[in-house]
Image (cartoon, grey):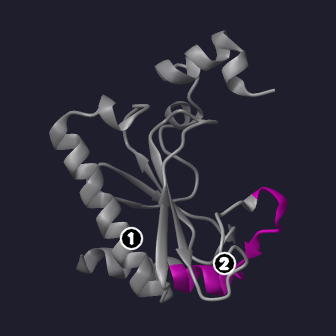
């Protein structure tokens, strides 16, 4: 059963009162703070280099943002996309905005590679084992991403 079917729970999530991101004050796995949000990642990833950009304040949809904030969020998305592509060597960058489970505005970044496990189709990490980066690999990835973001 989806969260949408429980109107009370969904209402709390939409308002921010029950939003796990807002309750924590910062999303888990935050590795950088950008103009409008936090960049997150973790050692377990659906594709090498997966990251998520989470808006700093609670909003659900892009149209909930003032123009200046939306422009800032797009600048952050552009910076993350370029930095990720540079660090990973991805041949394509997929960016997705859903909010179906946690309605707090965030964008998923999936670097794509020739021969990746989703090649030729959409990304569906649900039935697949995540890629697990060793601690040293993860540290190198995060350091490279932070350095690339400084240059953007």
128 falls in the magenta region? yes
Instruction: Indicate the position of residue 29 as horizontal and vertical percent values.
Output: 57, 58
Nearer to me, 141 or 107: 107
Q: Give the range drawn in magenta.
A: 126-141
Residue 51 against residue 140 in the figure, above or below: above
Residue under label 1: 81
Name the quadrant containing residue 20: top right
- Residue at (44%, 85%) from the top-left corner? 87
Neighbour tally class for label 2: few under 14, some 14-19, many 20 plus, Cα within 10 Å: few
**Along the line of sight, which residue is nearer the eye, 78 or 53?**
78
Q: Which residue was labeled with disc 2?
A: 119
Q: In which quadrant is the N terminus drawn?
A: top right
**Neighbours of disc 1 within 10 Å: few (<14), some (14-19), many (20+):** many
Query: Are the residues flagged by discs 1 and 2 in contact, CB closer than 8 Å?
Result: no
Badge 1 marks a residue whose secondary structure is helix
Task: Say which of 104 and 25 sits in front.
Answer: 104
Q: Where is residue 15 in the image (x, y as percent from the top left)?
A: 48, 18
Placement of 35 over or under 50, stated as above or below: above
Judge from the rendering whether residue 150 lies leftward or rightward of residue 116; answer left or right. left
| Element class at badge 2 | loop
> Disc 1 to disc 2, how far (Cα)?
19 Å
Q: Quadrant of the C terminus?
A: bottom left
In the displayed image of the protein, which residue is found farthest to the front?
A: 120
Vertical comparison of 107 with 114: above or below: above
Kindly give the residue lying farthest to the left in the view shown: 68
Which residue is at 15% across, 42% downward?
68
User: Which residue is the extreme one toward the top?
Assistant: 8
Residue at screen point 71% across, 15% down: 6
Does the segment drawn in magenta span residue 57?
Answer: no
């Amino acid at each position: 059963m989806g969260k949408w079917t429980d109107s009370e729970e969904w209402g709390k999530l939409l308002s921010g009162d029950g939003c796990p991101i807002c309750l924590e004050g910062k999303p888990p796995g935050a590795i950088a703070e950008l103009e409008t949000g936090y960049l997150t990642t973790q050692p377990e990833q659906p594709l090498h280099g997966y990251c998520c950009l989470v808006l700093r304040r609670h909003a659900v949809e892009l149209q909930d943002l003032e123009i200046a904030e939306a422009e800032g969020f797009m600048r952050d998305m552009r910076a993350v996309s370029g930095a990720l592509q540079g660090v990973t060597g991805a041949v394509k960058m997929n960016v997705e905005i859903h909010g179906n489970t946690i309605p707090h505005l965030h964008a998923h970044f999936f670097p794509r590679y020739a021969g990746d496990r989703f090649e030729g189709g959409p990304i569906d990490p649900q039935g697949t084992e995540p890629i697990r980066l060793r601690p040293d690999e993860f540290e190198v990835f995060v350091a490279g991403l932070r350095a690339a973001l400084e240059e953007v």
